Image (tube, helix red, strand yellow):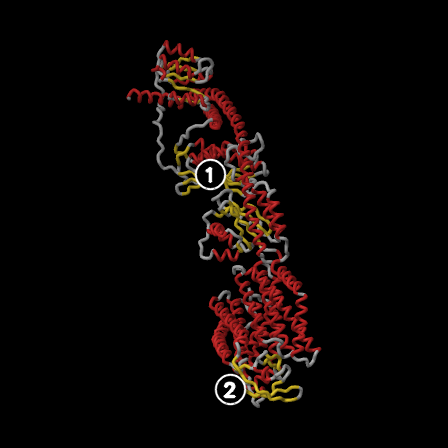
């Protein structure tokens, strides 16, 4: 703590002050014990006199003084012949028995015999209450010293209360005529001057304004000087010095100290920035003011102005009992059960008491001033007039006090019934959970005068609580966090099932295990109230309320309102859930209808793609076949390069056609050991031209140490194509030029592929649905909504995972993780890629002339005897007339197609049917795929080259050989 005005070490100063507290504690307890014992055995005359002239101010009815004939206004001249000012105490040896009291009355001295007695029980009540108060203050100071809450705050609290306790205790003893206690009484009063300012500057939180520190330092010099005088003056000279003005100086210093302390707290309240501090200062100021006002008006001011008090000092001190109650409230910040209901009542009583006491004092003073010499009759007349005035204004007084307290504690008042009725009516008009949440937080902020509100709710019983709506100072509260049903906070709220102030709720969770989400929620100081919403016996929502406007406190009526509304909100949430369920079902029905329509479209597209692929594969077969024939017949290097380019373009076209077929069919995953980096390169090559045209650059960061893994290369490529195409389209519609980065990394047993773009990003409300089938944000006709859904299915089919990270305006990054499969994938027996056997008698069944011709030339060039048929019927006739080693048959042909031809051949010549190799450009249609699976014969997909042709014949011979062996 920085103390720039002090030239001593703050830690040493604090330690010295703590030792002072302990030094005062023991004599205080001793004084309390001594006063308690001597009160019972001390002499009692029933007189209350005033210094310095020993005027009799009051006489207890029936007391020894009244029996002796002493009157109000008499001046005590001597006791047993000794003036009271000549010795202290005035009864040095008598505890009971007769004494001769000389009094001056109207210029005459009267000697009146007075019999001292023990103090009666009725007179012991006030002194014993004061001693109890001193004991309470001592206990509080000791507890705070041991607890060491906040160093300076705790020390200021302890020092003030310990000095106050010591002053009360020694004052009680000094009233019994003990000289050393009188010294302690006035020394403590002098030290309370800086101690009170010190506490006001440090409680409930420390402040370090330079001007106030200067005031505290000045008061320390003043109080310390007055205390030093009281210590140094001999006991025999103390009373005359007090009568000469020292007592009045101490009272004036105390009055200035109390006034300054209240000003410090009020200014701190105005300067406080957060609601918690403002509320603590507010309560502290109210506590200081309401508890000290009676003490100031009936004790300090009369002692400072008139030199004596208007009522017994013991009665004046009783109002100080309210002070620790208010300080305790400020310290614990409403952790005392029911204190929020007690404090207004206590405050109203204090205000009423101050007014009553002030009225009686005023009327009594006026009566004595008007009726001089009236004595006791004037006193009773003034009290009677005051009583009449108070009786007439009683109702107004009480209601006014309540209004003042209501406004001071709770701010603006409102009609409880009307607000509940209005809010319940508005809640019934909410449609849907989202609208209900916005309505609830808005109504609470407006109608209950709070700074903010938030609603956490769960979609179903047992589901986590998450942010539903918020407004005001709690806007965005708990966004992104969730509380599971087993969390400590949820279980605690479900158990309590009633509104909980933040401080009491935190106190109930002390020592309980909390996760990170719970700690973040509970640490939010904007929260003032937690309100559980119970539906069918389970916690389904939580209302979170901010502090009230103008730092007011939540009243008991406020808690009843929110508790009632919580029940109404629970019913409204059930209705909103029913509405949301109905709307969701209707949306599902509409989506199903849309999906059916889309599925029909896709089915038609699939058939179209199948037909187009078949039509494209036939000419591609001819192109590739003739190119290979030419390559073997020409020797010119340029011609060789041209032929290689033809074959390369034909191969690219074949890949495109196969990709089209992949979209149009469902096929079993065919996993092989693949290089992911190579698949990435091939994918980028396919789309390089279009992206270059649209000013989209592709950057590759490929891990050279990436291990191979078992995967279906075509399917993985399809995943990359879909994601890169989406990124390309997103950038194209967002900016003039952009960049797509593809990164591969090896992570232990996993390969991660990250595809990032600098497009517009994906909104949070869309992120949750990007992998849903048929979900698309593109315009009608631009996309089907199946791209990412297909990617998700392919990746999951490879035992991997795919997810997306995105921030609006900062692009999106798709991450794909595939497991590294180190087990060798079982492959089919290597195809016999050796040159075709010469002398094979081959039958070609093909309706496409170009395909048939190129196939004949390829086979004939390798020494095969080839015959051709343009359809299934012609092929059957040839098969019956001759023997063939191999039959190449197309599937889709006019007239008798390949499927019918094979069925007939299996019936007439089953041995030859086993030698059929199907040649087809359509493997996408379900009919063709089903037939090929049932037939179990080798398939030569169009387009093909010489190597594929040789492998197909080798596969056939392998199968035939295996069958013969079996």
> Toward which corner of the image does residue 739 lie, by quadrant?
top right
713 in relation to 482, above or below = above
Q: Is residue 784 left or right of residue 486?
A: right
Q: Which residue is mark 2?
A: 93
Q: SS for tag 1?
A: strand
Please tell me which of labels 1 and 2 falls first in the chain. 2
Distance from disc 1 to disc 2, alpha carbons, whole Å, reads 100 Å
| Label drawn at residue 802 | 1
With 866 as the anchor, is 304 left or right in this view? Answer: right
Q: Secondary structure at mark 2?
A: loop
Q: Residue furthest right?
A: 370
Residue 435: quadrant of the picture: top right
Which residue is outermost to the bottom?
A: 81
Specify whether residue 494 is in view: yes
Q: Is residue 512 left or right of residue 70?
A: left
Q: Looking at the picture, how far across and down is residue 128, in whole percent?
A: 52, 74
385 shown above or below 532: below
Question: Which of the two discs, 1 and 2, sits closer to the camera?
Answer: 2
Q: How far across and down, in percent of the image, does residue 481 sit?
A: 51, 48
Residue located at (63% from left, 54% from top) = 414
Q: Nearer the viewer, residue 629 or 287?
A: 287
Residue 322: give x, y in percent of width and height. 56, 67
Residue 25 shows which numbered tag?
none
Q: Position of residue 964 (x, y in %)?
A: 29, 20
At label 1, counting other C-alpha atoms closer than 10 Å, the crowd grade (few under 14, some 14-19, many 20 or more) is many
Determine crowd level at label 2: few under 14, some 14-19, many 20+ residues with C-alpha closer than 10 A. few
């Amino acid at each position: 703590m920085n103390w720039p005005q002090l030239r001593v070490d703050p830690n040493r100063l604090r330690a010295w002050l703590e030792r002072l507290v302990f030094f005062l504690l023991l004599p205080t307890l001793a004084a309390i014990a001594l006063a308690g014992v001597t009160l019972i055995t001390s002499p009692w005359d029933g007189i209350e006199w005033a210094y310095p002239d020993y005027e009799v101010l009051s006489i207890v009815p029936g007391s020894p003084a009244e029996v002796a004939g002493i009157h109000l206004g008499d001046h005590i001249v001597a006791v047993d012949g000794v003036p009271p000012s000549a010795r202290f105490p005035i009864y040095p040896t008598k505890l009971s028995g007769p004494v001769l009291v000389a009094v001056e009355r109207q210029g005459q001295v009267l000697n009146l015999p007075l019999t001292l007695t023990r103090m009666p029980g009725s007179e012991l009540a006030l002194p014993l209450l004061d001693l109890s108060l001193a004991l309470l203050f001592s206990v509080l100071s000791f507890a705070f010293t041991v607890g060491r809450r906040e160093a300076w705050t705790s020390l200021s609290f302890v020092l003030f209360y310990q000095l106050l306790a010591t002053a009360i205790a020694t004052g009680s003893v000094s009233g019994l005529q003990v000289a050393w206690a009188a010294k302690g009484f006035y020394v403590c009063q002098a030290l309370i001057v800086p101690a009170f300012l010190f506490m006001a500057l440090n409680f409930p939180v420390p402040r370090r304004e330079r001007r106030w520190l200067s005031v505290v330092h000045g008061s320390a010099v003043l109080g310390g000087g007055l205390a030093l005088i009281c210590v140094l003056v001999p006991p025999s000279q103390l009373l005359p010095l007090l009568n000469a003005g020292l007592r009045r100086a101490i009272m004036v210093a105390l009055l200035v100290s109390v006034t300054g302390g209240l000003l410090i707290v009020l200014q701190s309240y105005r300067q406080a920035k957060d609601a918690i501090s403002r509320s603590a200062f507010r309560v502290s100021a109210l506590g200081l003011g309401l508890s000290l006002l009676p003490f100031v008006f009936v004790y300090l001011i009369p002692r400072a102005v008139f030199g004596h008090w208007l009522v017994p000092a013991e009665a004046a001190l009783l109002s100080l009992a309210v002070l620790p109650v208010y300080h305790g409230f400020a310290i614990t910040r409403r952790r005392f059960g029911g204190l929020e209901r007690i404090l207004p009542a206590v405050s109203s009583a204090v205000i009423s008491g101050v007014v009553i006491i002030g009225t009686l004092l005023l009327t009594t003073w006026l009566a004595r001033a008007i009726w001089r010499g009236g004595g006791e009759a004037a006193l009773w007349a003034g009290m009677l007039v005051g009583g009449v005035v108070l009786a007439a204004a009683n109702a107004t007084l009480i209601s006014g006090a309540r209004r003042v307290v209501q406004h001071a504690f709770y701010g603006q008042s409102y009609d409880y019934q009307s607000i509940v009725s209005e809010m319940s009516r508005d809640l019934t008009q909410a449609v849907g959970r989202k609208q209900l949440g916005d309505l609830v937080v808005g109504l609470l902020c407006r109608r209950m005068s709070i700074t903010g509100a938030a609603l956490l709710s769960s979609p179903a019983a047992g589901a986590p609580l998450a942010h539903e709506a918020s407004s005001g100072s709690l806007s965005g509260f708990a966004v992104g966090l969730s509380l599971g049903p087993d969390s400590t906070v949820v279980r605690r709220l479900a158990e309590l099932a009633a509104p909980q102030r933040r401080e009491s709720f935190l106190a109930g969770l002390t020592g309980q295990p909390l996760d990170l989400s719970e700690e973040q929620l509970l640490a939010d100081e904007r929260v003032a109230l937690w309100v559980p919403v119970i539906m069918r016996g389970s916690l389904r929502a939580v209302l979170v309320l901010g502090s009230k406007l103008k730092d007011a406190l939540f009243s008991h009526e406020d808690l009843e309102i929110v508790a009632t509304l919580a029940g109404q909100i629970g019913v409204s949430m059930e209705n909103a859930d029913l509405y949301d369920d109905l709307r969701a079902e209707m949306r599902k029905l509409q989506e199903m209808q849309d999906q059916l329509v889309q599925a029909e479209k896709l089915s038609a597209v699939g058939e179209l793609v199948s037909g187009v692929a078949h039509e494209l594969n036939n000419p591609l077969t001819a192109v590739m076949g003739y190119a290979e024939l030419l390559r073997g017949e020409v020797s010119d290097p340029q011609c060789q390069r041209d032929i290689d380019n033809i074959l390369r373009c034909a191969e690219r076209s074949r890949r495109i056609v196969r990709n089209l077929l992949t979209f149009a069919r469902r096929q079993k995953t065919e996993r092989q050991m693949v290089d992911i980096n190579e698949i990435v390169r091939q994918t980028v090559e396919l789309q390089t031209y279009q992206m270059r045209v649209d000013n989209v650059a592709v950057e590759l960061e490929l891990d050279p140490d990436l291990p191979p893994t078992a995967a279906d290369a075509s399917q993985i490529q399809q995943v990359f194509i879909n994601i890169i195409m989406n990124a390309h389209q997103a950038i194209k519609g967002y900016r003039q030029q952009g960049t797509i980065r593809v990164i591969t990394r090896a992570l232990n047993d996993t390969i991660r592929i990250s595809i990032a773009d600098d497009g517009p990003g994906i909104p949070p409300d869309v992120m949750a649905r990007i992998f849903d089938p048929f979900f698309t944000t593109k315009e009608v006709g631009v996309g089907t909504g199946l791209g990412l859904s297909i990617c998700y299915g392919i990746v999951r089919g490879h035992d991997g995972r795919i997810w997306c990270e995105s921030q609006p305006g900062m692009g999106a990054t798709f991450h794909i993780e595939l497991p590294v499969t180190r087990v060798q994938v079982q492959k089919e027996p290597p195809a016999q890629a050796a040159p075709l056997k010469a002398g094979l008698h081959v039958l070609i069944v093909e309706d496409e002339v170009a395909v048939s011709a190129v196939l004949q030339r390829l086979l004939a060039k390798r020494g095969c005897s080839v015959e051709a048929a343009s359809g299934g019927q012609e092929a059957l006739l040839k098969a019956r007339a001759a023997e063939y080693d191999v039959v190449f048959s197309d599937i889709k042909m006019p007239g008798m197609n390949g499927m019918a031809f094979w069925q007939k051949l299996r019936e007439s010549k089953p041995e030859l049917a086993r030698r059929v190799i199907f040649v087809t450009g359509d493997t996408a249609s379900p009919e063709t795929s089903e037939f090929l699976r049932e037939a179990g014969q080798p398939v030569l997909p169009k387009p093909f080259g010489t190597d594929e042709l040789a492998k197909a014949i080798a596969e056939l011979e392998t199968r035939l050989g295996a069958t013969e062996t079996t």
